[in-house]
Structure formats: structure tokens, C-alpha cells
Amino acid sequence: MRLYDCRKASERDSAIKAAVSAVESGDLVVMPTDTVYGLGADAFKSYAVDALLRTKKRGRDMVPPVLVGSRKALDGLTISVPSMIKDLVAAFWPGPLTVVMHYSPTLAWDLGDDDGTVAVRMPLHPVALEVLAETGPMAVSSANKTGQPPAATATDAKEQLGYAVQVYLEAGPSPDTKPSTIVDCTGDVPKVLRQGALSLERLREVNADTLGVEDRD
């Protein structure tokens, strides 16, 4: 287990390589995002996802979101990307928008007891994007144990998670501790499931039919 300081040019390259190597080996990593720090694993290694859930002290019913390194990555996760998703990600990715969509039944992953859907986001943080560019899609949840406050730094995460994580990537305090806004795009119109850093008003500038948390039912 090691913590790297990505703010130091002398450590950044080796830190990214160490994180990528850990993910490819099925180990857990902690990395910064544009919201809170994330605890990540290879989305296509079921044992790594299981380790993530155990470390978080969560059951399989708490399916982790998936982070991707590009908008094009969506094409590999679903048979066809709906136009509403294309419009939203074109406007807000990379950034604090998580879209819930149907994933392709041919995908060789097991994220937990899902219903054939996955929550996907492209974070706006250079360190996270560098890692994701090499690893591909990662299952990522907030870097804290369930019931504990989200980690604002990798050092904070290390205090909670310890040796369960192989590599910690430190990049200083999170720029925004608000979580991402989650939008369900599995139906005919987008529905906000969690109001986060992205406002309903901004979402409606892209899709006027978007339903807020209070009126989505």
C-alpha cells in the first residue's frame, strides 16, 4: 500500500502507472475526482468489485457507479445510446453529471444486483482521466466506509480504508464536495434521482422535459 502525491511532478507519472497497474491486477485504488475522492476497481473484474463493496461495507444491492474516460466509452457499454443521453453528455461531460442507462446484456461484468442498468459518469479531473484512459471503465464509489463522511483528500481516505486499498492518489482537497447529479435516462424523459452539483435549471436548458426530484413520480 502506498500514497502518491500527484501534485509533485516527480511523482505524478509513477503514481498514474502504479494506479493503473493496481487496477489491472484487480486491486483497489483511491483517486481524486471533480467531486469527492473515489474508491475504484476494474468494472470487469467481479472479485475486484466485490472487494470494493466489502471495503465500503455494502451489500450487492448497492451497485457502484462506473466512471469512464471519454464520451465514446458509452458506445461500448450499451447497444444504442439514446439521443437524450447524447445531448446531456455533450453538454455536461466531463463534469458532475451521472446518467443511468440500460447496459448491453453481452457485457462481461457483475456490478451487483442491478436491474440491467448502470450509472455512468465522466469526471472532470486530470488525474482521474489519465487513469481511466489506461484502465477503461472503473467501478467507483466515494472513498469512505458507509456511514462515514466522504473523504476530501486521499489522506482522509487512507485513514478510513487503510490496507484495503493498494494505491492512493493524493491531489489535494476536493474542489467541490457536492456529489454529482444523477439523471435516470432509461425512460422516455430524463428524471433527476439525486440533485447534486448540477442544477435542474441547467439540465432543462438541454432537455426541457427533465423531471426534478419532487415531480419525477
Image (cartoon, rainbow, N blue to C red):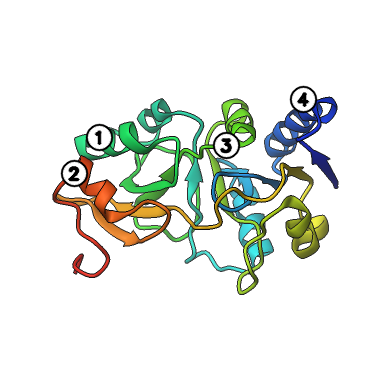
Quarter-of-image position of residue 43: top right
Three-letter amino acid code at the position of disc 4: Asp
Question: Are dots 2 and 1 in contact, CB under 8 Å?
Answer: yes
Tag 4 residue: 13
Q: Earlier in the sequence, mark 3 or mark 1?
A: 1
Three-letter amino acid code at the position of disc 1: Asp
What residue is rendered at 66% in x and 56% in y? 152
Tell which tag, 3 or 4, sits nearer the viewer.
3
Three-letter amino acid code at the position of disc 2: Asn
The vertical placement of 176 against 15, above or below, is below
118 vs 112, nearest the viewer: 118
Tag 1 residue: 87
Left or right relative to 142: residue 207:
left
**Which class describes the residues within 10 Å of circle 4: few (<14), some (14-19), or many (20+)?**
few
Tag 3 residue: 125
Estimate the spatial distance between the alpha carbons at disc 3 and disc 1, rounded to whole Å: 21 Å
159 vs 44, nearest the viewer: 159
Q: Earlier in the sequence, mark 2 or mark 1?
A: 1
Question: Are dots 3 and 4 in contact, CB under 8 Å?
Answer: no
Estimate the spatial distance between the alpha carbons at disc 2 and disc 4, rounded to whole Å: 40 Å
The vertical placement of 152 against 77, above or below, is below
Residue 54 spot, x, y in % from top left: 66, 63
Question: Are dots 2 and 3 in contact, CB under 8 Å?
Answer: no
Q: Earlier in the sequence, mark 3 or mark 4?
A: 4
133 vs 170, nearest the viewer: 170
Residue 36 spot, x, y in % from top left: 59, 53
Tag 2 residue: 207
Residue 40 spot, x, y in % from top left: 63, 47
The vertical placement of 149 against 31, above or below, is below
What residue is rendered at 20% in x and 65% in y? 216
User: Mark 4: which secondary structure?
Assistant: helix
